[in-house]
Amino acid sequence: MNARPDAASLPIRLADYRAPAWRVERVELDFELGIDATEVTAKLLLRRDPAQHAPLRLDGENLELLAIALDGQPLPATAYRTIEGGLEVDGARDGSVLETRVRVLPAANTALEGLYLSGPRETGFLLTQCEAQGFRHITYFPDRPDVQSSYTVTLRADRARFPVLLAGGNPDGAGELPGGRHWARFADPHPRPSYLFALVAGRLEKIERDYRTADGRDVQLKIWAEADAIASCHYAMDALERSMRWDEQAYGRNYDLDVFHVVATHDFNMGAMENKGLNIFNTKCLLADPDSSTDDEYRRVEAVVAHEYFHNWSGNRVTCRDWFQLSLKEGFTVFREQSFSADMNSAPLKRIEDVALLRRAQFPEDAGPLAHPVRPAEYREINNFYTATVYEKGAELVRMLAGRLGAEGFRRGTDLYFSRNDGRAATIEDFLAALGEANGIDLTPYLAWYGQAGTPRLKAHGEYDAARREYALTLAQYTPPGAGQPHKQALPIPVKLALFGADGRMLPLHLDGQTAATEAVVVLTEAEQHFVFRDVAERPVPSLLRGFSAPVILECDYTPAELALLLGHDPDGFNRWEAGQQLALRACDALRDDADPQAVAAWCDALAALFDDAQLDAALLADLLTPPGEIELAERESVVDPARIHALRQQLQRRLAARIGGGKLDARYRALAAQSTAALDAASQASRRLKQRVLHLLALLDPASACDHAATQYRDAPGMTDRLGALAVLARHDGVRGTESLAHYRARYANDPLALDKWFALQAQLPGEGALARVQALEADPAFTLKNPNRARALLGTFASGNPTGFHRADGAGYRLYAERLLALDALNPQIAARLATAFNGWQRLEPRRREAAHAVLATLSAHDGLSRNLAEILGNMLK
Ligand code: PHE
Ligand code: ZN
């Protein structure tokens, strides 16, 4: 019964999609809940597609079938059979009712998919995770998103052990049962796919708030958590209320049930889950309090709460026809969250953060052996496709569409999309059709973006003709072959742009007889096109792809002086930062090749000037002072030596620190430290961010005095941002005080799992020789366990993805240790093992010694017997 699905099974293809032969109109589920064993009775009202004659097949995995009846008659053993991954039943007709009773084993479920136990068996609680295919681990069912059903769910359990019983939908009765047991029933008026099913049972506390929707519905908002965490849920409640209001205003979307439950668990594979009426969150994305959460974590909680809430429309009311359409709900919902967060916080900072994430996580994915289109054509294990490409690149595609239609047109389009597809399981084509039809615009050219993997390169070249006062901009696109697509087609690429004069002011634009203001969007649709601007008074400096108007890699032959001009003057906050990043890349190349000293000077001089600019937002300055990360630097190399890249980036930052000067850095640090508070407003967060950046730069120049500051900051920190920032500097630059402070932190937060995760992660990132031994020592810490995904990610995931010099030791010892842990993890939780294995992405471009070591490790690992389908698929792709 526990046999692994065949790791070598055939891929599932989008082209093979067929509508279901059997649907389920209504489901009645009855749970007899227990920690070790739970019994599930399911009554399914079946509907047959008259045009299809396939037998009734239900998905089911790890289920022990206890009873089965059709239309009230127990079925003889000859009338049904277990097949690979499910059950086949004879004799069903349209309108038949199939009743099954199965047993599942929550406490033994370490994969955290289906029904499982969170926490210790004595005190923990039961919960479910069904996306993408967890429901088949709970009962026999056609477990696919285009089967939408009305759910009635009854939970029965011991009252003392499980005082709280929750399922999605509206409450529909509750009461006592003999023997200290009780029951509760929930009915959901909205038909929904099985992946949105959820239940929660156990000892939980709650906070509540009343909410009235714009269309007049009274809703009770309830957030549930274990007793020691409930006090940290208030910020999430505020964020939830803000999200609900925003979705009413920005998209005209109202909540549609009488209750909205949110539950926090420490044991969760992903960030959170949008189950209808019963969102379930990883504590990491829900709990927030000043003593244990950083500013970044506060913003993340707000973003994830919004994301899950927004799914109620983009995902739940309108769901996906099949899992190939995953980005229909995820890309759109990420985009919705990005717009919300931009409205709640600083829009340019949010854009910088999101583009940095895209470049760090999605560009490398799109350039390597795991590359796949936003809408993949095939998969073996759908859980491997919850990727940066589907989420983040998918959001960029929606952003391009929104930009193409303008704010009002986009709203018209989404209104039509929601109304036309409400209650349906839709496709990407349905999305483009609704947006287009509402505006009389054909958006089908954008479909190519969904089907083609790889990041397009956009080459830009400008020529100024002083005599004719014309500026001709040539744009050309090229996407390298990959992901089984040898010839890539040209895509529509919207390029938002402005032209700058030498004095740093924007020039008026005259293009095709139109006079816009100072900003325009041109759309490149061919491989190459020319755009001629007339009446241009002087040789301009173009600011291209403003706000990152398309997810491409821009190659433009700027001089360092031109980039410095944009860095100094571009009012588009994103492009200003971008000019600085491009200049930093030039400076980095110059250091590496011992060439072009102007590039280094240009970057340092421009930033030194901005450092003195009292008008500049502190958070933007902090970001400007941060060069692209090591992963981004590695992306530009054809042969990667992680140690060398690390050294280069350090050298670059040291040059910057020296150019600004130790005296100025020290003075700025002191000034910022003097204003230190625990307040969470934007200005306070910005000042902490800059303070941390300044301290980091100072540490590269004068570690002793930076560590003195850090020691004081650690001791007096009013909140986690300052405390963790100081700890990072001490751990890195001060052997004695680093060790002491780490021990102090370990003791102070001994009972706070999320704070401990940060302790593991911080140490996992410390670069250099000692990194591997440090990781092994941390594995021996009693708080370390592979069973908790957050903990495994904090130590092992951070080591592999956030510590290039440690993981990529030249002798391959980092790879070997990691591969052993992946194997151990795979036996417990295949989803997590597969995700962590993606840290090897990019191994083919490593310098020869590391490449051979990585290859040997990957080959051995993939030859292992009994790998999960999840891990086998990732390794197989990696070695292709
Ligand atoms: N659908 C969830 C989200 O984005 C992610 C998720 C996928 C959670 C699969 C659990 C399992 O928002
Ligand atoms: Zn989502």
Image: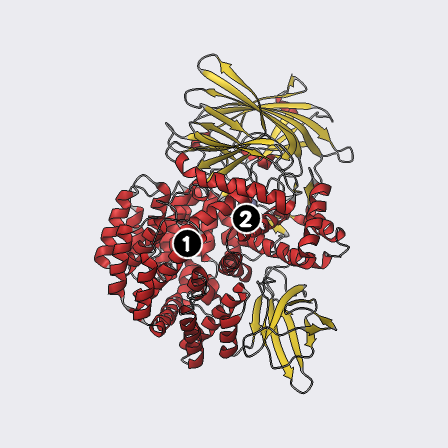
Q: Does the closest atom of ligand 1 sit within 8 Å of the Cβ of label 1?
A: no
Give x and y (percent) for residue 563: 51, 74
Give x and y (percent) for residue 575: 54, 66
Q: Secondary structure at mark 2?
A: loop
Q: Residue at x 71, y 48 (%)?
A: 430
Q: Quadrant of residue 455?
A: bottom right
* Residue found farthest to the left: 736
* Residue found farthest to the top: 178
Seen in the image, is 47 located left or right of residue 734? right
Q: Is residue 285 above or below residue 198?
A: below
Mark 1 against mark 2, which lies toward the viewer? 1
- Which image quadrant shows ligand 2? top right
* Residue behind mark 1: 685
Determine the CA span between mark 1 and mark 2.
31 Å
Callout 1, which amino acid? Gln
**In the foreground, 661 or 528:** 661
Q: Is residue 848 above or below residue 425?
A: below
* Residue behind mark 2: 386
Seen in the image, is 306 located left or right of residue 828? right
Disc ID at residue 705: none
Give x and y (percent) for residue 761: 36, 51
